[in-house]
Image (tube, grey):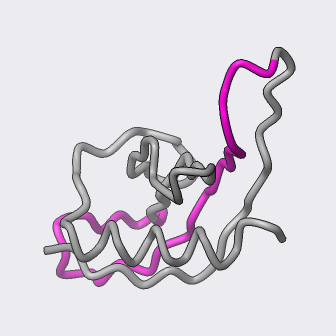
Amino acid sequence: MIHLNITGHEVEKLEDPFGLLSGDRYEFFLELDVDVEDELYSDKGVGLKVIFVSDNGGNKISSYYFYERGSEKVLDFALEEDEEELVLTYCRQHREE
């Protein structure tokens, strides 16, 4: 289990110039504090890129991936159900910044 400690973020509302997609989409870059003992740990730091969707059907995470900060190397890890809920709640609370 990855213990997520979100320490900061950048968020940008994504534009749909052709109006093909319903709802609003946001791209989040979450900064994570990962324990040195965790298999996800990197000296450079770890981030989580999330595409968050808010529409009439509710809020959801469309896609995400972990990456090594600095090198942008994609890391092959997945969120567990409770971690995904934590990220979803975080994105919901910070989408309009």
- Count of marks, rendered view: 0
Q: Name above or below for residue 37 compared with residue 80.
A: below
Q: Nearer the viewer, residue 27 or 19?
A: 19
Side (left or right) of 62 relative to 52: left
Q: Is 58 situated above or below 24?
A: below
Dividing the image into 4 quarters, which one contains the C terminus? bottom right
| Residue at the outermost top position | 18
Residue 60, given in percent of the width and then of the height, sits at 46, 55
Instruction: Report the residue that reaches farthest toward the front.
Output: 56
Residue 27: image location, x then y, percent:
66, 48
Residue 6 appears left or right of 19 = left
Q: Which residues are magenta?
A: 19-45
Q: Residue at x 52, y 41 (%)?
A: 72
- The spot of residue 31 in percent (x, y) is 56, 70
Q: Position of residue 91 (x, y in %)?
A: 58, 68
Q: Closest to the observer: 93 or 42?
A: 93
Tell me what residue is drawn at x 43 percent, y 39 percent. 73
**Is residue 22 shown in magenta?**
yes
Q: Residue at x 79, y 48 (%)?
A: 13
Q: Residue at x 19, y 75 (%)?
A: 38
Q: How would you classify the magenta stretch by its main secondary structure?
A: loop
Quadrant where the N terminus sits is bottom left
Does the magenta run of residues contain 32?
yes
